[in-house]
Every structure is written in structure tokens, then in C-alpha cells.
Image: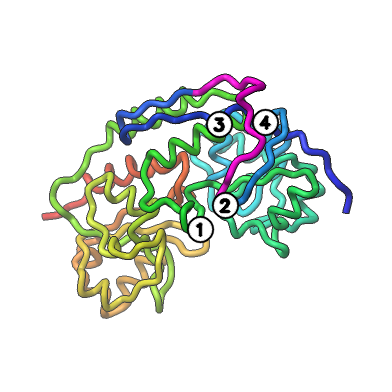
Amino acid sequence: MPTLPSILAVGAIVAVALSGCATSTATTTSPSASAVPKSVDNCGTTVDLPAAAPKRVITIKSTSTEMLLALGLGDRIVGTAFQDGPAPAQWKAETAKLPVLSPQVPSQEAVLASEPDLVYAGWESNFSADGAGTRSDLQALGITTYVSPAACKEVGYQPTKLSFTNIFQEIGEVASIFHVSDSKLLAAQRKELASIPKDKRGLTALWYSSGSDTPYVGAGIGAPQLVMDTIGLKNIAGNVKDTWTSFNWETIVNANPDVIVLVDASWNTAAKKISMLEGNPATANLDAVKNHRYLTVPFAASEAGVRTVSAASDLAAQLAQLDLK
């Protein structure tokens, strides 16, 4: 297997000063030779950082693709893989032009054929011997790897409870890696976040992602919890210390949530979930099901990233339209 040259480097990793979700501020430091770190600890993996900004990037998962598009770095993407659904309108045309390496995790052969200097993944599991390649193997070939910090699973790296501070810090870190400013994107994110109304009625909710016999739901420390906290919904699975979790229908029936948030994925649509909920005698009697109190969120917007703020804003608007008499 040939060794590929690495062109990747990073500017100074920004110190993002964040004192709160909607009112915090961030600064981007211009890169200087003395401030360029030799490595960064990313999800417990030491990533060596050469000296020039990345020119050829493979993005795995929608969160990494959309992060670069939001920062105006679409021209650096030489391949995408494992995209979770259609891009939102502002990136649809640009996304359509990006080379697709695989509908799922790309093989290491496909990765190497694209000659990247950086592979940016949404999940740690995207890097494996039978996937895009292990992080150590790719690093040995001169290819830098980076995982969305919000997706870290190791103790000491997984956020204790995801906040917008974590998301804004990733924006700043990625911007620094590419030597671009994060200020415009962060300002837009904070402005939209500050405008989101928080429901005060104490409504309970189920965040239903997938599964029929065993439902897979948003738990208490990840993006679903962050979004529900932001719009004023109490998560019935919020006491589970995980980002997502397997749950059970008996607990859901006993909780009888006021609202059900449905993750709309091409492989398990919101319409399919509604049909299942309304066709099952146990769940058909839930108040949310009988009264069609459904909110929907695209799968790609359900994971932590640059769409988390807009996902919260959209769900808040849907919540306001529900008849909750």
C-alpha cells in the first residue's frame, strides 16, 4: 500500500471563551509559527498536525460534511460517505456536486484512492480495519484523522452532558485547523439560539429514533436531551446516562408522554413510526398518539453539529403549532 503525502496542518487551536449557550463569545486567533501545536488529543487519540491547512478532505457522516460547508470549506471535500439524509436547502446544490465514496462507511481502499490529507468522521467507529482504516494505520500513511468531539465515547472525552458550548468549541477547533474564521458562523448560531422560545408547560416527551420490538430513543446526555432542554420538553428517558439508549414500550406506556419526537430517516421514516405507533394496541392509547402530537426531525439534524441549533428552532416552532388542549 503506497504511502500518501500529508498536507495537513493546523493553526493555533482556538481558545473559545464560552460562558453560556446564547450569550457566550468566541475568538479566533490568527495562526503563528510559535502557536501551532505539534499534536492534539482527539477522543483519546494523539493526532500529529503538520504545517499547512488541509486541502483534500474526506468527510464521513453528515455532521462532518455540514461542518465544513457551514465554514465555507466545501471546496476542500474530495469525497463523502455515510451521509444521513438530504442536506438542508442552503447546502443542497453544493452537496450534490461532492463525490460520494460510499453510502455507508467507505473501505480503506476507497479512502486511499482519493488521496486525502485529512479524514473527518462523525463517529469513532467509522475508523476500523474493515472500514475507513484504523486511525493509527492512516496516520502512519501520512493521513490525519479527526472525530467530532461530541461523539467521543471514552471516559474523560465524552461530554458529561452535551451543551452548546461543546458544539461551539468544535466549530472553533475545526475553523482553526483550516485557518479560517469561526466568527460569522458562531454569531449566526448564537443569534438563532437566543431566538428560540422555551415552552413553560412542563410537557413530557419521547425522542423516538428507531426500533419496533425494542425502541431506540434519545437519552439524557446527548443531542436529543440538549434540544429538548432548549425547547422546554422533559425527556422521559432523561435519567439514562447515555446519548441514545434501548428502551422498552412498557416504560413508555407508563410515562404516557405528552409529545413524541420522531426521527425521520430514509430507512425508518416518521410516517412508518406513526403507522406502527397507531397500529399497536399498547401505544395506540398513548395521549400523544391519540391526539397526533408528533414533532419530526431529520436524522442528519438529530446528531450534534451545526444543525443542532436549527433543529431546536424548528422543533420549537412545531411544538407551538400543536393543539395541546
Q: Position of residue 180 (x, y in %)?
A: 58, 24
Residue on which disc 2 sits: 44
Distance from label 2 to label 4 (Cα)? 29 Å
Mark identifier at residue 110: none
Distance from label 1 to label 3 (Cα)? 21 Å
Identify the magenta region.
28-43
Residue on which disc 1 sits: 154
Residue on which disc 4 sits: 75
Q: Earlier in the sequence, mark 1 or mark 2?
A: 2
Distance from label 4 to label 3 (Cα)? 22 Å
Please report the residue visible at 67 percent of the width from the left and 31 percent of the height from the top. 75
Residue on which disc 3 sits: 13
Please, what secondary structure does the residue beneath circle 3 have? loop
Q: Is residue 316 visible?
A: yes
Please, what secondary structure does the residue beneath circle 2 have? loop
Q: Earlier in the sequence, mark 1 or mark 3?
A: 3
Contact between labelled residues 1 and 4, with CB atoms less than 8 Å apart:
no
- Quadrant placement of the N terminus: bottom right
In the image, residue 14 above or below residue 153: above
Q: Is residue 59 visible?
A: no
| Type of secondary structure dominating the magenta stretch | loop
Q: Residue furthest right?
A: 2
**Residue type pointed to by label 3:** Ile
Please, what secondary structure does the residue beneath circle 1 have? loop
Please, what secondary structure does the residue beneath circle 4 have? helix
Q: Position of residue 138 (x, y in %)?
A: 75, 51
Q: Earlier in the sequence, mark 2 or mark 3?
A: 3
